[in-house]
Image (cartoon, rainbow, N blue to C red):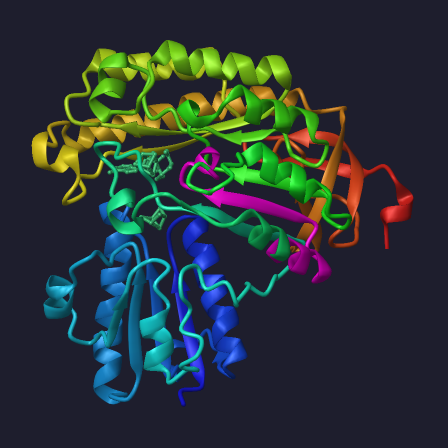
Amino acid sequence: MTNRYYLWTVGCQMNKADSEKLAAGFERMGLKATDRIERADIVVLNTCSVRQHAEDRAYSKLGRIRDLKRTKPDMKVVVMGCMVGLKTDDLEKRFPQVDVFARPQQFAPIIELIDGPAEDLGGEFWPTTYAIPEGPTAYVPVVHGCNKFCTYCIVPYRRGREKSRAMDEIVREVAYLTAQGVREVTLLGQTVEAYGHDLAEQPDLGDLMRELSALDRLERIRFLTSYPKDMTHRILSAVAELPKVMECFSLPVQAGSDAVLESMRRGYTRQEFVDKIAEVRRLMPGAGITTDIIVGYPGETEADFEATVDLLEELRFDKVHVAAYSPRPGTIAWRKMPDDVPADVKAARLHRIEEVEARIAEEINQHYVGTVQEILIEGVRKEQPFGRTRTGKLVHLDAPARIGSLVDVTIGHAGAFSLRGAVEDSLALV
Ligand code: SAH
Ligand code: SF4
Ligand code: F3S
């Protein structure tokens, strides 16, 4: 049996969660991790296809592996994740150095490749295997796939339709995680509010949050990614009412122009999105809200782009993830719309969004100076503990603090990307 594995992961939190699960499965089968690819008996690349750039990273890694395999012909190579579609003939032709291609959530061919136990080949979501937590925070996928088919997006083609995990199964996993020292979980879904509609009892995300809140050792619950249309008043009320659920939203808008939103098939208008944010802020003043923007979508005019800038000024997000449109083979936009915004225009628009947002984020963060914030200490970097506020702001501490503890911190300094502060409660110090 193969005994050393090298696991490389790109992409979103869902991919990270899949990798952590695979790593836990490998460890249980007696394999050991290595961060030196040339020492590995099995190499696994967990890939992302959301933009060309993400795929390019996997291609360059595969070039390196092709060379390595000439000297180590027994080394096994797996490509898993969102680069792998239903049909793999093209990939097989292009990358003969790969032994197995596995779709997201498809663990069986990987287990078979390493002669793992035939009685546990993963199955849907591999329920017998939980990730081994590395600290006080953990990701927990609750709904897989996506049904939305936004025109530009490859995710539904690679991760399939929405499929929720049973509520008791999720509660069991989170209880296990808390027994291992986890204090905060982030519930994951491409559209996390879609949770439950495909289950017999049709619970919603709020019901799941309520169940999880009853776990004593769990202090905090986060959730991503939100989809405006699925974010019902009922779910928002649960977030507002449950003390363990953080007032922190990752709510992609993608564009500020109605023409672009419609072309993207996002399913909401600018005004509907603005109203949704207003509802969030009415229920939870001061909630942290981040968003995603695509610039240079097919047909995006200067006026469309200015509408996006204007929306950022109006809504004042805590953070914006901005990306230049990248045509994805197989998607509706790729089939029907020419990629007609020149690369230099895309780059200039991207830069402009980053500039505008850096100013807004810094202004928002300045309001934190002098306030006391509850922080969960997640780890230590360069001898400084760090953690997040309830609203999702990264805070570095001036003095030592115990990892996993909840501390009150007085914010003394704020920049565009993080805050700095001192612990109020000396009992939490070590
Ligand atoms: N489910 C989430 C996010 C999915 S992908 C949502 O509904 O928004 C993460 C982000 O990647 C998206 O929010 C979008 O901003 C970006 N993205 C997706 N496809 C893209 C493409 N073809 N080109 C550029 N950015 C893209
Ligand atoms: Fe992609 Fe749209 Fe689904 Fe998000 S909601 S994963 S952008 S198809
Ligand atoms: Fe990438 Fe797949 Fe996530 S395409 S962003 S890894 S769902």
Q: Position of residue 124 (x, y in %)?
A: 40, 60
Identify the residue at image location x=21%, y=56%.
Answer: 85
Q: Position of residue 152 (x, y in %)?
A: 22, 35
Does 265 sit above or below residue 152? above
Tell which quarter ligand 1 is in.
top left
Query: Does residue 392 appear to the left or right of 310 in the view shown?
Result: right
Identify the residue at image location x=51%, y=20%.
Answer: 360
Of residues 328 and 427, the one nearer the viewer is 328
Q: Position of residue 246 (x, y in %)?
A: 64, 33
Does 263 sit above or below residue 35? above
Identify the residue at image location x=19%, y=20%.
Answer: 300
- Which stretch did the figure color magenta? 173-196
Query: Does residue 341 appear to the left or right of 1 in the view shown?
Result: left
- Quadrant for the C terminus in the image: bottom right
Q: Quadrant of residue 308?
A: top left
Q: Can residue 184 be found in the magenta stretch? A: yes
